[in-house]
Amino acid sequence: METSPRIVAVVDDDPSMLRSVERLLNANGFPTEGFLSAETFLTHAQLQSLGCMVFDIQLGGMSGVELWHHLRQSGVDVPVIFITALEDETLERTAAEAGCVAYLRKPFPAKSLIAAVNAALVLLPRD
Amino acid sequence: MLLFVTSHSTAVGEAINQDPSPRVLVIYPYDERVAATTVAGEAVRNRLLEATGGKIDLFSEFLDLSRFPEHEHIERMAQFLAIKYADRRPDVVVALGEQSAKFIVDHRASLAGNARIIVAGFNKSTGLQMNLPTDVIGAFTEFNIIKTAEFARRLQPHARKLFVIGGSSEFDRWWLETAKAELAEFSKDYVTTYLEDLTIEEFVAKTAALPSNSIVLALTIFKDRSGRNFIPREAVKQIAATATAPVFGPYSTYIEYGSVGGNVVTFEALGRTVADLAFDAIQGKPITHVQAPHFNVADARQLDRWGMSEKDLPPGTVLMFRQPSFLEQHWLAALLASAVIAVQSIAIILLLVERRRRRTAEVQSRHRLLEVIHLNQSATAGALSASIAHELNQPLGAIRSNAEAASIVLRSACPDLKLIEQILADIQDDDQRAHDIISRMRGLLKKRAEIEWQEFDLNDLTATAIKILKGEAVRRGIEVSSTHASDALPVRADKVHVQQVILNIAINAMDAMGKAGREKKLMLETRLTKDANAELSISDSGDGIPDGKLAAIFEPFYTTKASGTGLGLSIARTIVETYGGRILASNARDGGAVFRVIFPLAKAETT
């Protein structure tokens, strides 16, 4: 049976942040897969089962934005939500123009993230 | 003038010898050891020698009448002197004392012919009693005991007893009778005793047992009851030496012999008075009776002995033998010492003023430095604000998500309490993380009013600085690494300031790597140097310091950055040097700059 493409991938280099986001999504009924860096995501993520991706922008190595560009260039077209602790309006604008579903600044209200994830799952082309 | 004097003299008559040097004979009543007459006689001689410029013949004769009072002796003496001076008739005869006066008056015809006669040293009433011829002129002295008694009363206002001492010679007895009459009124205020008809031993014994509230007045003792002759002041000396009450006397000659003082004619003054009369007589001027001046005289040593105060002395009293004060004795040394002290004081004051000025300047400059450091801290905080906000937002974001997740979990039918517990633990950790960040920020922004000296480990401080910088480094894509010495590196300084040094150098290094496309690395390394200093080196992978600029980079306002103030490294150096350290810049062999900050260890040895 094909896995429901409703898994939300979360990439954040801050372990506590990653855990809390996953918990929040899980509590709202979304299964998650968490990664601490862009690199581990690229090597371990089950891209086909992903319904949505939540990327932190600043990830130590490759940034969330770079990861997204990389995926798109590789033909992966999974909706993305950026979460960031940075206060960078230029970056936010660039991301929005590139077509991200949402750009959330930490700390963000749960409903913003859930709404964004729901929206992303609706947008999912395969659905 | 000489001609005038000569012709005048001639006109006056034969009285003045035609010899250019007039002859003056001074007759002393006693022997040469009786001070009163010798002192007066010497004063006469000196004054006359001085007045005539030495053109005078002076003769002295001591009648020794105290020891040879017999009439026969006096007559033989008169005959002898008449023969002796037969060819050198004196122009002026000065007779000192009553007995000399009597002698010359009785024998002037044989001895001095037409010489002018001047008598001195006794009072006028005595002169009248003697029926002095009218051409015999006197320099009288009024030895009135009452003035001496009053002098004593001023110094001993609480005295209740009065003792008057007199000898057994004719003169002594006359004196006692005179004193009794003169003191009749004065002695009413006292229990008065006349000590007379006593041997010298009895005088000494009685005066050695007097109550201290006694006034003792010594007249003269030329002879005691046993018939022994005395020079009065020698007798007074014996008495005063052991007396238990102060002894006063009407003679200045007693002063050095234990008398506290009295109203006296100083014999020098008497002598000068007589000499002036004699000089006028030599010049043929008319002369008349005069009164020799009296003085109150006191012996300072006796005032000390009896605990009397100089302040109680009657005004105008001549105070003799006053111990010169230290200043009087060593005035030159004192003056020099005072001058030296004054100069030193001025120098010290100037130095203090200078020191104070310098200290004020130091304090001001330190306050300015602290002010500048604080501005630098604020600027650093500003530069790091983005990364600090980012750092803070991480735990805050996690806390919020965890809390919201937990509330959803709790609303479910069967809440996973284990999960809730994990969530709460994470929330606590994140809260602590946020607190730590704020603490570091507070440390970064801490303003110092004064330097806070503390001892800390440079390793720990470097680790804290790295935590502050980490966020910024990550934001800029810079990899921060560090190694630290295995030894503790105790340094004594203000922690906040040294942290600022590290931040300044590190931020400078990160700025230097801004445009470099290659790998960005910031390396912080602490170590214990061979010469036992604590060293922190901060190296970067930037372009290094341009050649020839190694010296300039620590200068204020030196900057290569558009946004830089050019103060970071300058302030860093100032701070390091304030704490006795050094800061060095160099380029690494494989590129990039290396800054080394070296502080002396707080302790000599580290283990």
Image: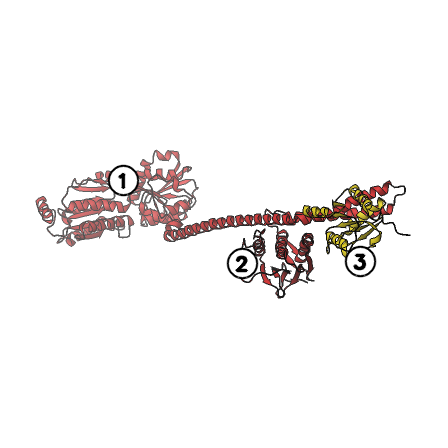
Chain colours: A yellow, B red
Q: Do the residues labelled 3 and 1 touch (CB within 8 Å)?
A: no
Q: In which quarter of the image is residue B583?
A: bottom right
Specify the quadrant that holds the C terminus of chain B.
Answer: bottom right
Does A115 appear above or below B33?
Answer: above
Q: Which chain carries label 1?
A: B
**Label 2 neighbourhood size at 10 Å, few (<14), some (14-19), many (20+)?**
few
Judged from the image, the secondary structure of the residue bearing numbered disc 2 is: helix
Q: In this view, does B216 lie to the left or right of A32?
A: left
Residue B545 place in picture, x, y as percent: 58, 60
Amino acid type of the residue tagged 3 in the rendering: Thr
Q: Mark 2 lies on which chain?
A: B
Residue on which disc 2 sits: B552
Does B209 appear above or below B186?
Answer: below
Residue on which disc 3 sits: A43
Q: Quadrant of residue B405?
A: top right
Residue B158 place in picture, x, y as percent: 42, 37
Whether residue B105 appears in this view of the structure is no
Depth check: give the residue in front, A101 or B388.
Answer: A101
Q: Are marks 2 and 1 in contact (CB under 8 Å)?
A: no
Amino acid type of the residue tagged 1 in the rendering: Glu
Depth check: give the residue in front, B423 or A14.
Answer: A14
Residue B95 place in picture, x, y as percent: 21, 47
Residue on which disc 1 sits: B142
Q: Of circles 3 and 1, which is in front?
A: 3
Labels in figure, total: 3
Whether residue B158 appears in this view of the structure is yes
Judged from the image, the secondary structure of the residue bearing numbered disc 3 is: helix
Residue at image location 39% in from the left, 35% down from the top: B190
Q: In this view, does B112 lie to the left or right of B606?
A: left
CA separation in Å, label 3 and label 1: 142 Å
Depth check: give the residue in front, B584 or B45.
Answer: B584
Residue B259 place in picture, x, y as percent: 36, 46
